[in-house]
Image (cartoon, rainbow, N blue to C red):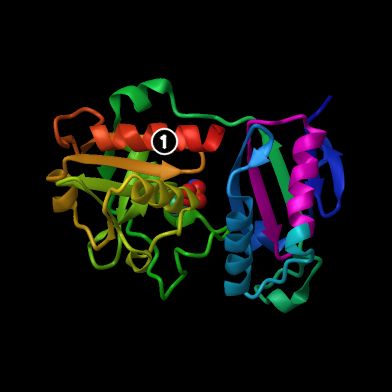
Amino acid sequence: MSLQIYISGKLYNKEDAKISVYDHGLLYGDGVFEGMRSYNGKVFRHREHLERLWKSARAIMLEIPISMDEMEKAVNDTLAANNISDGYIRLVVTRGAGSLGLDPNRTQNPQVIIITDKISLYPDEYYENGLEIVTVSTIRNHPAALSPRVKSLNYLNNIMAKIEGLQAGCEEALMLNHNGEVAECTGDNIFIVRNGELLTPPIDAGILEGITRQAVIDLAREAEITVREIALTRHDIFTADECFLTGSAAEVVPVVKLDRRVIGDGKPGPITRKLKDRFHEYTRS
Ligand code: PMP
């Protein structure tokens, strides 16, 4: 059977799942989204993702046409309809179809789209040996232009950085903010370990408040590892003992090189491995 896609209250075969070319989500990237994981049939930190989606929508003055409870049920029902227990979920809310002008008041019927699919993971090698990343010259959106806290359908800032990273042969790329501080990667948050402490840029460094980031902070604190959210520069990463990235798809992935410079001893470090394993257990328990 074909994959079933939810669009605004109904399930469609993948081939028939379509929305209007006049939708402002397509015309202007006017909308918001979430990327979530399910483990053993249960969505990981489902409510937190929905709360972030609702905050993103609120920030762009988009009213989601269903309630949070209805959305939660729609996601669970779509997973069940596709018989997916371990998968990836893409939740999209668009501004809806309108006229060929920016004015969001000229749109109708925001569309809610739920795609549940198999997860495409980084190769095992990255988890065992670590990832190599580069700093790109595309800076993260200035928070006063479009806040990185909004997970909007306009992801070109990240895509431009991703292109630069790929051109340099790297799967992930480090983005700095307008102050030259470390912000995050194109689709993942970043952490370093220094003298046994876990350090990560604060939200006001211009980053997305990653759900995995928060889960890892919680797990580290439970393990009595000190966690500090402080401004970091490339210098801090070059001189760190360990470095890793977090994201719903990537989970916890070690980073062993930045800009061709070896971090620590060039291997995934002990705290990174511990948190990676704890996260793995936590999500599968
Ligand atoms: N930063 C950006 C820019 C992202 O798009 C994402 C999600 N892919 C993340 C960080 C990680 O967030 P989460 O842990 O909620 O997936």
> Does the closest atom of ligand 1 sit within 8 Å of the Cβ of label 1?
no
Can residue 207 be found in the magenta stretch?
no
Q: Quadrant of residue 274?
A: top left
Looking at the image, can residue 29 be seen?
no
Side of 86 relative to 1 (left or right): left
The residue that mark 1 highlights is 278
Give amino acid for label 1: Arg
Q: Quadrant of the C terminus?
A: top right
Q: Is residue 108 above or below residue 191?
A: below
Q: Position of residue 279 (x, y in %)?
A: 44, 38
Residue at screen point 30% across, 59% down: 201
Q: Nearer the viewer, residue 66 or 156?
A: 66
Q: Which residues are magenta?
A: 70-96
Residue at screen point 51% across, 43% down: 248
Q: Position of residue 171 (x, y in %)?
A: 38, 35
Q: Quadrant of residue 120?
A: top right
Can residue 72 be found in the magenta stretch?
yes
Q: Quadrant of the N terminus?
A: top right
Side of 208 relative to 185 (left or right): right
Side of 100 relative to 256 (left or right): right
Residue at screen point 58% across, 31% down: 119
Q: Nearer the viewer, residue 56 or 45?
A: 45
Q: Secondary structure at mark 1?
A: helix
| Number of dots carrying numbers | 1
Q: Position of residue 276 (x, y in %)?
A: 38, 34
Looking at the image, can residue 138 be seen?
yes
Q: Around disc 1, counting alpha carbons within 10 Å, would you say few (fewer than 14), some (14 to 19), or many (20 or more)? A: some
Q: Is residue 84 above or below residue 193?
A: above
Residue at screen point 81% across, 66% down: 109
Q: Position of residue 12 (x, y in %)?
A: 85, 40
